[in-house]
Image (cartoon, coloured by chain):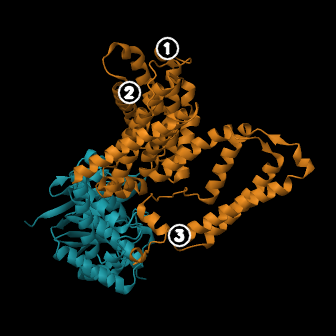
Chain colours: A cyan, B orange
């Protein structure tokens, strides 16, 4: 079924006198590779925080599969099928890569805590099943060799990929990536682009991403929304965005 | 197969607990009580480690949970023990459960406000909670108010105290071996990320408080029946801080660390109580050799890397060196006339030595003696030169 998976309608959030996101609306269809771009401070990450429940919109609505999710707690939203990564990497730093991903699997556990406290077979089986799943995901993100390394010991690019693996572990329908290519060299970001495309093609995920690397966004995303100072200034396919005078103005300043 | 192993290991642990009791009772008059109290401190430290070390919720009101367990169980025993048919051990076990339940209700009450608080703020709330409980008990005549409560009958079963400690250790260990434990650790590491991964952070925090306080409450019930007397001053803020020190010193999050630090920190002042008088020469020698060993061990920390075995050997050499230095210095200084007349009672110096030990250990290893490591047979194997080529690869 093709239909809107995520609808953001007239979302606005005010922090005191500051309107961080102002009347933003966009719609993601199943299987979209969707980009959210804009200059620094445009409200992109705030948009992510609205969708994932960190903030509640002051006005406007956010619908996920025709279900309002505005105001739900982040963990409920994750359980409904939206997973994210963070702009400033937020891994569980002293835990191993595999353990990080296993925490992503945790929302699907079915065994109660009593079984874990007594270390009974159901809990043992569940744990080893999740470890297997985690290792598969690490393999997918090309991290199998560092499964037992502590997350904080990994190089930057691998930490970014580990965050994606952890988000994938929640088996989301919609994946929000906040600057996934930040700090990567061109070769790494090319590989990442292929991986993200695979997540859509092979795993049928819908992807919404924030990115400053224009080459990355223009090559990967099929539709793009541009924010500036909290307002939506353009929306459309990459070619249209590239030549949109308002976008050029927002990024480069007014022509003299 | 699973159940055979499980039953055998439970039997082994129960056997061990009876072994501890038999050993304790074969000692001189004061010793059995130390064994009992050590077991209780182990339970307190490991249960606080669940809240503080594993889940990262900075709680310094653990004595309150201990007190709630002691008061509730003590009160029930005074009222009802004589009129009921249960035998001593069964009744004590039931009282452990009741004390645990009562304390876990209190844990729930503290856990709920903690959902919005972090770090220092939570610490203040738990501190306040601890004082509130103590002062409520202090002013409640039904449980003896400031005089305290004579708990009759005394039910002194050291094996049961250690069984409780073993249960607490096992539960913590089991938790960490499963994916549930990872969720607890995730909350400690990064609440926001855990929440975004669908982990119900609220639920995990409350569970940690309930579990940790339940064990402290059960330990309180054991204490009340072992001592036969409880008094609000036994559950002062100092106790909370000592237990917290055990957790931090052992290495926050490490069960092994909590157990060993609890044993060491409880017994150190107890043994110093009966230590021989400290002469002037010993005092000077002790201070000098301690300074040298701190320097040596710091050097080892910064310069010796690589295999576990090498590191342990280097630390061992450093410690042995400073002990030798101490003995040598004492011999040399023994003839210095100005030191000869000085003599301190060890029992008066014991809290100084206790504090100095803490300061030195925290200087040497701020992450705690065991950091986040646990005891494992693999580690022992590596220590004794079992090849670790496979581990490295």
Q: Secondary structure at mark 1?
A: helix
Residue at image x 16%, y 67%? A29
Measuring from the top left, give residue B238's x and y in whole percent: 59, 36
Dot 1 alpha-carbon crowd within 10 angstroms: few under 14, some 14 to 19, many 20 or more: few
Residue at image x 76%, y 56%? B327
Mark 3 or 1: the one toward you: 3
Q: Chain of mark 3?
A: B
Check if mark 2 and mark 3 are on a common chain. Answer: yes
Q: Where residue B309 is drawn, which disc sits there?
A: 3
Dot 3 alpha-carbon crowd within 10 angstroms: few under 14, some 14 to 19, many 20 or more: some
Q: Chain of mark 2?
A: B
Q: Find disc 1 in the rendering and name its residue.
A: B141
Q: Find disc 2 in the rendering and name its residue.
A: B92
Foreground residue among A11 and A167: A167
Q: How many marks?
A: 3
Is residue A191 visible in the rendered image? The answer is: yes
The single residue placed furthest to the left in the displayed view is A1
Q: CA distance from mark 3 to mark 1?
A: 59 Å
Measuring from the top left, give residue B341's x and y in whole percent: 88, 42
Figure check: B322 above or below B84: below
Q: Quadrant of the C terminus of chain B?
A: bottom left
Residue at image x 66%, y 64%? B318
- The reply to whether callout 3 and callout 1 are in contact (CB within 8 Å) is no
Figure check: B177 above or below A177: above
Figure check: B306 above or below B20: below
Measuring from the top left, give residue A194's x and y in whole percent: 25, 82
Answer left or right for A139 relative to B373.
left
Answer left or right for A149 relative to B289.
left
Residue at image x 37%, y 23%? B88
Q: Secondary structure at mark 2?
A: helix
């Amino acid at each position: 079924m093709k239909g809107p998976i995520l609808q953001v309608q007239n979302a606005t959030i005010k922090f005191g006198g500051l309107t961080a996101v102002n009347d933003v609306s966009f719609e993601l269809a199943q299987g979209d590779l969707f980009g959210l771009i804009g200059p620094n401070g445009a409200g992109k990450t705030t948009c992510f925080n609205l969708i994932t429940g960190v903030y509640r919109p002051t006005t406007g609505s956010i619908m996920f599969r025709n279900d309002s999710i505005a105001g739900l707690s982040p963990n409920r939203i994750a359980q409904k099928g939206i997973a994210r990564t963070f702009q400033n990497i937020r891994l569980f730093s002293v835990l191993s890569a595999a353990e990080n991903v296993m925490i992503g699997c945790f929302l699907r556990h079915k065994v109660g805590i009593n079984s874990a406290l007594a270390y009974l077979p159901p809990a043992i089986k569940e744990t080893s099943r999740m470890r297997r799943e985690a290792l598969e995901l690490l393999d997918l993100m090309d991290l199998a060799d560092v499964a037992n390394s502590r997350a904080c010991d990994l190089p930057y690019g691998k930490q970014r990929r580990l965050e994606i693996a952890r988000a994938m572990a929640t088996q989301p329908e919609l994946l929000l990536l906040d600057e996934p290519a930040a700090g990567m060299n061109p070769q790494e970001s090319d590989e990442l682009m292929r991986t993200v495309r695979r997540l859509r093609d092979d795993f049928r995920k819908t992807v919404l991403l924030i990115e400053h690397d224009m080459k990355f966004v223009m090559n990967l995303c099929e539709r793009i929304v541009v924010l500036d100072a909290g307002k939506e200034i353009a929306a459309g396919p990459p070619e249209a965005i590239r030549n949109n005078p308002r976008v050029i103005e927002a990024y480069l300043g007014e022509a003299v | 197969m699973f159940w055979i192993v499980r039953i055998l290991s439970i039997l082994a642990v129960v056997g061990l607990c009876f072994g501890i009791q038999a050993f304790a009772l074969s000692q001189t008059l004061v010793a059995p009580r130390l064994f009992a109290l050590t077991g209780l401190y182990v339970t307190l430290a490991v249960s606080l480690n669940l809240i503080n070390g594993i889940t990262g919720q900075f709680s310094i009101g653990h004595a309150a949970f201990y007190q709630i367990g002691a008061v509730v169980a003590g009160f029930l025993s005074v009222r009802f023990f004589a009129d009921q048919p249960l035998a001593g051990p069964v009744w004590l076990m039931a009282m452990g459960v009741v004390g645990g339940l009562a304390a876990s209700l209190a844990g729930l009450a503290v856990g709920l406000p903690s959902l919005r608080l972090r770090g220092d703020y939570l610490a203040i709330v738990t501190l306040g909670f601890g004082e509130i409980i103590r002062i409520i008990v202090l002013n409640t005549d039904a449980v003896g108010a400031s005089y305290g409560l004579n708990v009759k009958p005394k039910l002194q079963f050291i094996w049961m105290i250690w069984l409780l400690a073993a249960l607490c250790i096992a539960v913590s260990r089991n938790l960490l071996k499963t994916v549930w434990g990872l969720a607890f650790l995730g909350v400690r590491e990064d609440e926001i990320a855990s929440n975004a991964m669908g982990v119900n952070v609220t639920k995990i925090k409350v569970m940690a408080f309930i579990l940790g306080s339940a064990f402290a409450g059960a330990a309180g019930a054991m204490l009340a029946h072992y001592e036969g007397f409880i008094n609000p001053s036994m559950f002062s803020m100092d106790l909370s801080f000592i237990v917290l020190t055990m957790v931090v010193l052992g290495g926050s999050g490490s069960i092994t660390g909590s157990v060993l630090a609890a044993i060491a920190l409880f017994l150190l002042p107890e043994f110093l109580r009966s230590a021989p008088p400290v002469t002037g020469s010993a005092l000077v020698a002790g201070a000098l050799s301690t300074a040298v060993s701190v320097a040596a061990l710091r050097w080892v920390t910064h310069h010796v890397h690589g295999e576990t075995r090498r590191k342990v050997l280097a630390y061992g050499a450093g410690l042995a060196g400073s002990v030798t230095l101490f003995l040598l210095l004492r011999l040399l200084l023994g003839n210095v006339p100005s030191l000869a007349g000085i003599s301190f009672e060890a029992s008066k110096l014991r809290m100084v030595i206790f504090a100095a030990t803490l300061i030195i250990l925290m200087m040497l290893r701020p992450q705690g003696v065991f950091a986040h490591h646990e005891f494992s047979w693999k580690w022992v194997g590596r220590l004794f030169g079992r090849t670790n080529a496979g581990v490295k690869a």
